[in-house]
């Protein structure tokens, strides 16, 4: 169970990073040729190594951090049209998957002190 949660969190985080890069660089950038919003993927690299190593503390704080991307997904799914709105829904899916996996991983790995 814990191994599946780690895999789910890792895959969803990497997928979210790749989605952010592709979305703002190629698929549906705000400006033709890409935009500086591609840099929104950079903060997602901060928890990546802790998630890959299974560090419980990283799972805890990144579960709150990912809610920023969830909020962006909700706003853009509501306000954008076409491909950008569909990509926002995909962002919502990845953030929800990461959030659920991170919360349950942190809960199941706590020590009984």
Image (spheres, rainbow, N blue to C red):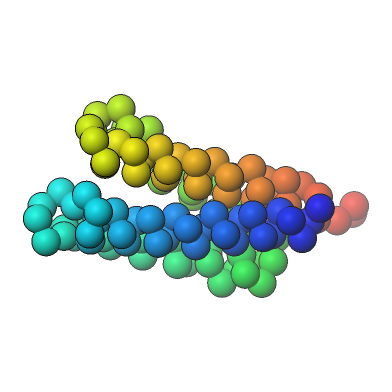
31 horizontally vs 100: left or right: left
Relative to the observer, which residue lies in front, 98 or 18?
A: 18
Question: Which picture quadrant has residue 32?
Answer: bottom left
19 horizontally vs 48: left or right: left
Q: Residue at x 22, y 32 (%)?
A: 81
Q: Quadrant of the C terminus?
A: bottom right
Can I make out residue 34 in this image? yes
82 horizontally vs 62: left or right: left
User: What percent of the width, then of the height, locates residue 96?
Assistant: 54, 41
Can I make out residue 40 in this image? no
| Figure check: 12 above or below 64 | below
86 horizontally vs 103: left or right: left
User: What percent of the width, then of the height, locates residue 60?
Assistant: 63, 52
| Figure check: 74 above or below 35 | above
Relative to the observer, which residue lies in front, 45 or 28?
A: 28
Q: Residue at x 22, y 49 (%)?
A: 28
| Figure check: 74 above or below 37 | above
Tag count: 0
User: What percent of the width, then of the height, locates residue 20?
Assistant: 34, 56
Q: Residue at x 64, y 43 (%)?
A: 100
Q: Residue at x 36, y 60 (%)?
A: 41
Relative to the observer, which residue lies in front, 46 or 76?
A: 76
Which residue reaches farthest right? Answer: 112
């Amino acid at each position: 169970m814990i191994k599946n949660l780690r895999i789910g969190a890792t895959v969803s985080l990497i997928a979210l990073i790749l989605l952010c890069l592709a979305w703002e660089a190629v698929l549906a950038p705000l400006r033709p040729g890409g935009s500086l919003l591609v840099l929104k993927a950079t903060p997602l690299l901060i928890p990546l190594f802790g998630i890959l190593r299974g560090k419980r503390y990283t799972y805890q704080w990144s579960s709150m951090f990912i809610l920023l991307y969830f909020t962006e997904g909700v706003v853009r799914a509501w306000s954008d049209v076409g491909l950008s709105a569909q990509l926002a829904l995909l962002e919502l899916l990845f953030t929800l998957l990461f959030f659920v996996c991170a919360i349950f991983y942190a809960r199941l790995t706590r020590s009984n002190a």
